[in-house]
Amino acid sequence: MFSILFFILLPLILAILLKFNMPPLASVKSWSPFKIDALGIVTLLGADAVRKSLGRLTYSPFEYFPLLAGHIFADNSVADPIPGFILYNITEGMKATDLSAWFTRWLLCQKVTYSATKLKITGTTRGREPTSHHSRARTIALVLNSFLIIWPLLSSDWYGSVASFSLVGLVAVRIWTLRAMRQSLDANFEQASSATKSSPVNLFISLPTGERITVTTTTGITQDCLLTEARPKSSWNHMIAQTIAWVAFGIHVVSLGMACLAVQLALLISTLACSVAVVRCWWSEGWNSEEHRLGSRMVIKRSDTSGVQSMAKMYVLLGLNDEEEQNMVDWSLIPTRSSRLWLPTYRQFKEDARHDPSVLDTWGNRLRQAYEDDERAQAAAAL
């Protein structure tokens, strides 16, 4: 609907302008109380922030608006994986460092706690995109993009017109690429939903920022979604989209500096404001994105434990069995069995927590008491 309305309204406006053969705002072109230099550099700003925000594949109404860093879809860096993540499949005893790019960016956009955040990744039978607020966002985006094209036409600024058309072209490529990546994620989820891959698993993920989270999901979602990249189905169409993005970005960088000041200000203000909005998550309560929805099927539910945070508390809440605990020991996530104090204290702590959950906040005191008792015992033995 967005594209149909856009390509219907634009020819009508152009026909009206050609009929009168006189730009109504021709005087705006000569308005130049100051000059802005090096505008091409401005288009490169905010690449990392915009890449992280859009690359997590959540639905955001601002993806229909003009943004900075249009080249991230031309060079496909929006789909480049981020190093430093480690996924431990505790149930199946597997370790992986090649998490999918969208999932790593999604995790970095969350305000997780050091050891109290737990995710549950499941699916839904609803096979459609979120609709809340999105029709409104598309309408506003249509108005803004149309204004950016009409404004230089009314002022007879042809360089500005080229800059505006190229900017809207980047928006179109972005919309197509994100939709293709989400469709790929949906296809991966369908493959992960087979009966042979429905076994529940516990995951432990270490982030490059130092936080650690636990995840409960299935074998299929782990293998086909969290560890498999979401890429457009047609590599040929993707290559064409990248080529269009490179051409549009290059034209925009060159023509923006040659446009009149009024058009430059309109393009800069709109792209800067929308970029800040998408990065800072304005209207996050339902407006900016739906963080729990990935694609049209995947759902991520988050919960944070209250009280005193500790890794031992996280392990107990995971409900690890003996085999899973051994896997954690092998990965050095739990002190090795050579530890005389940590492991016995943890086992007693785990047993007590089964009968009384209130002891989950006493781990620090218990471990400190164990070390103090050990020091006193060693001192007594030395006498």
Image (cartoon, rainbow, N blue to C red):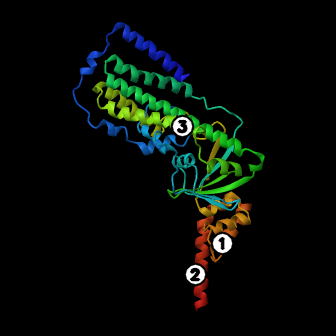
- Eye-nearest disc, 2 or 1: 1
The outermost residue toward the left is 33
Residue designated by label 2 = 375
- Eye-nearest disc, 3 or 2: 3
Tell me if residue 104 comes above or below residue 349 in the rendering. Answer: above
The outermost residue toward the bottom is 383
Q: Would residue 132 be seen by someone viewing this image from the given angle?
A: yes
Cα separation between marks 2 and 1:
17 Å
Residue designated by label 3 = 238
* Element marked by disc 2: helix
Residue designated by label 1 = 343
* Element marked by disc 3: helix
Image location of residue 277, percent across then percent down: 45, 36
Residue at 31 percent of width and 21 percent of height: 157
- Earlier in the chain: of badge 2 and badge 1, it is 1
Left or right: 83, with 301 as reference point = left
The outermost residue toward the top is 20
Image location of residue 345, percent across then percent down: 66, 71
Q: Would residue 273 be seen by someone viewing this image from the given angle?
A: no
Q: What residue type is labelled 3?
A: His
- Mark 3 nearby-residue class (10 Å; few <14, some 14–19, many ≥20): many
Tell me which corner region of the image, top left, top right, bottom left or bottom right, holds residue 1: top right
Q: Which amino acid does label 1 sit on?
A: Leu
- Earlier in the chain: of badge 3 and badge 1, it is 3
* Element marked by disc 1: helix
